Amino acid sequence: MDHITETCREIKDKLSAYLDGELETALCAEIEQHLRGCDNCRVMVDTLNKTITLYRNYGQDEVPPDAHTRLTRVLNLERLKMKIQQST
Amino acid sequence: MKPDQPRDEDLVRQAQAGDETAFTELVHRHERHVYTLALRMLREPADAEDVLQETFISALRGLKHFRGDATFATWLYRIAYNATLMKLRHPPAPASLDAAIENDENAMPRELTDWSHDPEAALMNKETRRVMDAAVAALPESMRSVFVLRDIDGLSTDETAAVLDISPEAVKVRLHRARLALREKLSSYFGAPRLTTKGAS
C-alpha cells in the first residue's frame, strides 16, 4: 500500500471541488495523474464519490401522507382566513 | 421537472394573481425539500411537520411581496431554514465539536476500504439507511445545513449560500468537511480498514 505524501494531503483538500467539476483542467489532470499511481487517494476519491451518490439518491425524506393531508387542510384554512380579512 | 411543465416563476405569477392550483403545485414541488431540511436539522418528525406548515403559510401570506430577486426555491428554503432555527430547542453545537472536526482537517482518512464498486442495490437496506441518517445527524449544525441543502436537496452552491446567508466559499469548505466526515462513517460501516499511515506497520 502506498505511503501518504504531502501531495495526498493537498489532493484530499481539493477532492470535493474535483468531483463537483469546479477545478481547472490542468489541476484535474494533475490529480488524475496522481490517482493513477496512488491507491490510497483513488480509494478515497471513489468512496467519497459513492458517499455523495448514495445521499443524492437516497437521502431525501418523503413527506408522510398524513402530514401532507394536514398541510393541505391548514393551507385551505389559511386561504379562507385571508379571504375573510380581505373582505372586511 | 419535465420540460413541458411550467417554471416556478410562472406558477408564482399565477399564484400571485389568485390561482390557487398554481400555489398547490408549488407546494407539491417543494414540500419534500422543505421537509427534508427541517427533519435533518430538527430530527423530530413532529417538529419537521410544524416547520413544513409554518413555511408554506408564510409563503402563502408573503407571496404578494415576492419580487423574484432570488429564485422562488431560494426564497422558500430561506423561510424554512429560519423557521427551523427558531425551532431548534438546543443551543448550536458547541464550538468544541466544530473544532474537533476542523482540527481533524489535516488528518488523513482512517478508513480506506474500497467499497465504491459495490452496487447500490446491495448497499442500500434499512440498516444502511439508519447508518446514513445517523451520520448526518452527528454532523455539527453548520455543516449539516450545508450538506442537506447541497447534496440532499440538490441546491447549487450559490443558492445554498443565499439560503444560509453565508459566502459561497464557506459553503464549499463546510460541504467538503461534511462529506469527508460522512465518507469516514460510511467506510467504517461498509468495510474494515485496510491500513495506512506513513510508518504504519
Image: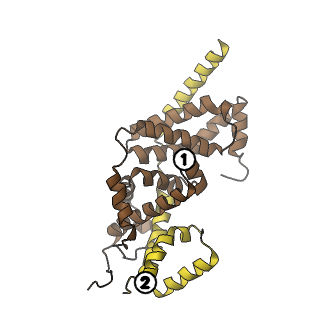
Chain colours: A yellow, B brown
Nearer to us: label 2 or label 1: 1
Whether residue A22 is situated above or below residue A28 in the rendered picture: above
Query: In the image, what residue occupies the spot 57% across and 44% down?
Result: B30
In this rendering, would B19 be left or right of A69? right
* Mark 2 nearby-residue class (10 Å; few <14, some 14–19, many ≥20): some
Query: In the image, what residue occupies the spot 50% across and 42% down?
Result: B81
In this rendering, would B26 be left or right of B116? right
Query: In the image, what residue occupies the spot 47% across and 71% down?
Result: A13
- Residue B57: image x %, image y %? 55, 31
Q: Which mark is residue B165?
A: 1
Asked if badge 2 and badge 1 are on a common chain, one would say no
Nearest the eye: A15 or B190 = A15
Real-space Cα separation, disc 2 to disc 1, in angstroms: 39 Å
Quarter occupied by the N terminus of chain A: bottom left
- Residue B96: image x %, image y %? 32, 54
- Residue B73: image x %, image y %? 61, 45
* Mark 1 nearby-residue class (10 Å; few <14, some 14–19, many ≥20): few
Q: Which mark is residue A39?
A: 2
Which residue is most to the left? B201
Assign a secondary structure to mark 1.
Answer: loop
In this rendering, would B114 be left or right of A74? left
Q: Amino acid at mark 1?
A: Asp
